[in-house]
Amino acid sequence: MNANDAMRAMIEASGKSGRQVAREIGRSESFVSSTLAQGVCPRADTLVRVADACGYKIVILPNDVACNLLDGSDRIVVEYDGR
């Protein structure tokens, strides 16, 4: 999953609309909808703010730490593919 997919998944899982999340992070609704529609990778600070608004935390792990160390089935894992 990339950062754009994670942003979409967090918004959907939160039950909030894009408009609600946009308002909570201080951005326009068109920013959120166009970011999602165009598949744009959001900046890290934007992703953190979206996560917070949706009830998630961003956790950064070293490459050698398995993601399965985190408990819970509702986690969203973003992996960098080098692009």
Image (tube, rainbow, N blue to C red):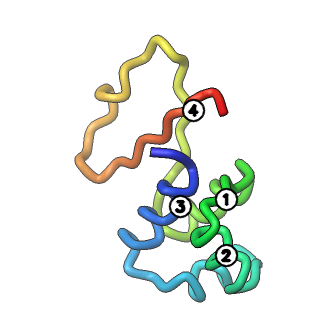
Could you tell me which secondary element the residue under label 4 belongs to? loop
Residue type at tag 2? Ser
Q: Nearer the viewer, residue 51 or 18?
A: 18
| 68 shown above or below 64 | below
Q: Nearer the viewer, residue 21 or 37?
A: 37
Could you tell me which secondary element the residue under label 2 belongs to? helix
Q: Of tags 2 and 3, which is closer to the observer?
A: 2
| 75 shown above or below 39 | above
Residue at image position (76%, 78%) is: 26
Residue type at tag 1? Val
Q: Which residue is mark 4?
A: 80
In terms of sequence position, does the residue under pointer 2 or pointer 1 come before the other?
A: 2
Would you say the residues marked 2 and 1 are in contact, meaning their CB atoms lie under 8 Å apart?
A: yes
Numbered badge on residue 34: 2
Q: Is residue 1 left or right of residue 60?
A: left
Residue at image position (42%, 62%) is: 9
Q: CA distance from mark 2 to mark 3?
A: 12 Å
Q: Quadrant of the C terminus?
A: top right
Q: CA distance from mark 4 to mark 2?
A: 22 Å
Numbered badge on residue 40: 1
Q: Residues within 10 Å of mark 4 (few under 14, many from 20)?
A: few
Could you tell me which secondary element the residue under label 3 belongs to? helix
